[in-house]
Image (spheres, rainbow, N blue to C red):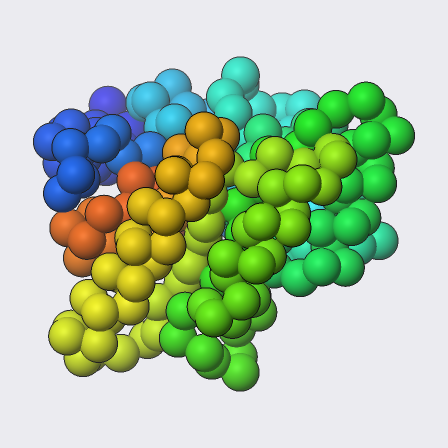
Amino acid sequence: MGEIATRVNALKTELSKGNAYGEKVLLVAATKTQTAAAINEAIEAGVDAVAENKPQEFRDKNELLLPCPRHFIGHLQTNKVKYLIGKIELYHSCDRDELAGELAKRSVGLGICSNILIQINIGNEESKSGYAFDEAKEVFARLSQTEGLCVKGFMAMLPDSDDEALLRGLTRKMRGLYEWAKTESSSVEYLSMGMSGDYKLCIEEGSNVIRVGSTIFGARDYGAK
C-alpha cells in the first residue's frame, strides 16, 4: 500500500466515528498541484470526493481521473464557470451574488440544477471572500429561490489563529446557522468546515465535510504542475 492510500485509510478510520452530532463526515481530497496518479491513488483508497481550486487544473486532469464525485473549492471567476458547469457535483465556494448569478444562468441554459454551498466569511477577514455571517440567512433564502441552483448548505474557512476558544465559537455559530437552514429546506445536508490544520476541531463542533490536502498527499510542492 502506498503512502497516500495509507493516509486515506487512517483518515477514514478516524472519521468512521462521525462528527459530534453522529453524522457521517465526508472526506474531500483537495487536489491542488497533485498529479493524476496521486489523485487516483486517493480515489482508489476511498475518498468521498476530489476537489480542485482552479478551473484550468480541473480541465487538465479531469479526463485522467477515475470515477469519483468532483467538487470545486476555490475562488471562482465568473468567466471560468463555463469550464466547470455540468461537471461539478458540488461547488463549495459560492461567495458572492455575481458568481451565483453566473452559475444559475449557465445551469438553466443546460437544463440542470447546480449544487452549491454558500461561503461565509466567518472570521470577517479582509483576506477571505464570502458573505458576512449577518447576511447569511437572507442570502440563503434568496439563493434557495434561484432557478438553476440547489443550496446544499454552507462552507467556511476558520482564521489562522491559536485561540481555540475563538475558533470553537466561530464553528458553533456556523453549526447553528446550518441547523437553522435544515429547518428551512430539506435540500440542506452539508456543513463544509475543516482543512488539514483544523479539521479535528471542526468535526468536534459539527462539520460534516472536511477538505484536506497535505494530510492525504503530504507537503504540497508548489512547483508541480
Q: Residue furthest right?
A: 109
The percent coordinates of residue 70 (x first, y second) are 56, 30
Image side of residue 127 versus residue 148, left or right: left
Residue drawn where x is 56% and y is 39% of the image: 151
Image side of residue 138 versus residue 168, left or right: right
Quarter of the rendering containing residue 28: top left
> Could you tell me if residue 159 is visible in this image?
yes
Q: How many tags in the picture? A: 0
Residue drawn where x is 67% and y is 40% of the image: 145
The percent coordinates of residue 94 (x first, y second) are 61, 53
Residue drawn where x is 69% and y is 28% of the image: 113
Image side of residue 218 versus residue 167, left or right: right
Is 119 or 42 nearer to us in this picture? 119
> Could you tell me if residue 58 is visible in this image?
no
Is 147 or 66 nearer to us in this picture? 147
The percent coordinates of residue 193 (x first, y second) are 35, 53
Is 17 or 216 nearer to us in this picture? 17
Quarter of the rendering containing residue 162: bottom left
